[in-house]
Amino acid sequence: MRKPPLNPDVADAAPADQVLTDCDGQHVVTYMRLLQADSEGADWMEVARIVLHIDPVREPDRARNAYQSRLARAK
């Protein structure tokens, strides 16, 4: 089994499949970082910028949607 990337870019939304996908496998570290940030009460905008590589000031809707869908998928 190959190691997942440590800091991959993300699509605008997480997969909606009921089963784990290859995309989920590539984003295991991303999901862990999102869960940790959420448990620590981190600001979603900072998490979007650092973890998801999306600037929430320039692209607020895209950043919010990506953050919410990835966090929901991680949970």
Image: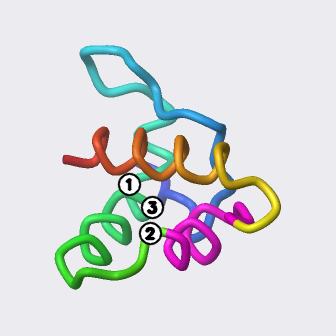
Color style of the picture: rainbow
Part of the protein shown in magenta: 45-56
Q: Residue at x 64, y 72 (%)?
A: 49
- As for residue 6 lying within the magenta part, the answer is no
Calculate the distance from the C-alpha at mark 1 to the C-alpha at mark 3. 5 Å
Count of residue discs: 3
Which residue bears the numbered disc 2? 44
- Return the disc, 2 or 3, that comes first in the chain's sequence: 3
Within-10-Å neighbours for mark 2: few <14, some 14–19, many 20+:
some
Q: Are marks 1 and 3 in contact (CB under 8 Å)?
A: yes
Residue 5 appears left or right of 3: right
Q: Residue at x 68, y 64 (%)?
A: 56
Q: Residue at x 74, y 66 (%)?
A: 55
Within-10-Å neighbours for mark 3: few <14, some 14–19, many 20+:
many
Which residue bears the numbered disc 3? 30
Residue 9 position, x and y percent, is 69, 55
Hey, which quadrant is residue 21 in on the image? top left
* Amino acid marked by disc 3: Thr
Which residue bears the numbered disc 1? 28
Compared with 35, 46 (above or below) is below
Calculate the distance from the C-alpha at mark 2 to the C-alpha at mark 3. 14 Å
- Return the disc, 2 or 1, that comes first in the chain's sequence: 1
* Amino acid marked by disc 2: Trp
* Amino acid marked by disc 1: Val
**Which residue is most to the right?**
58
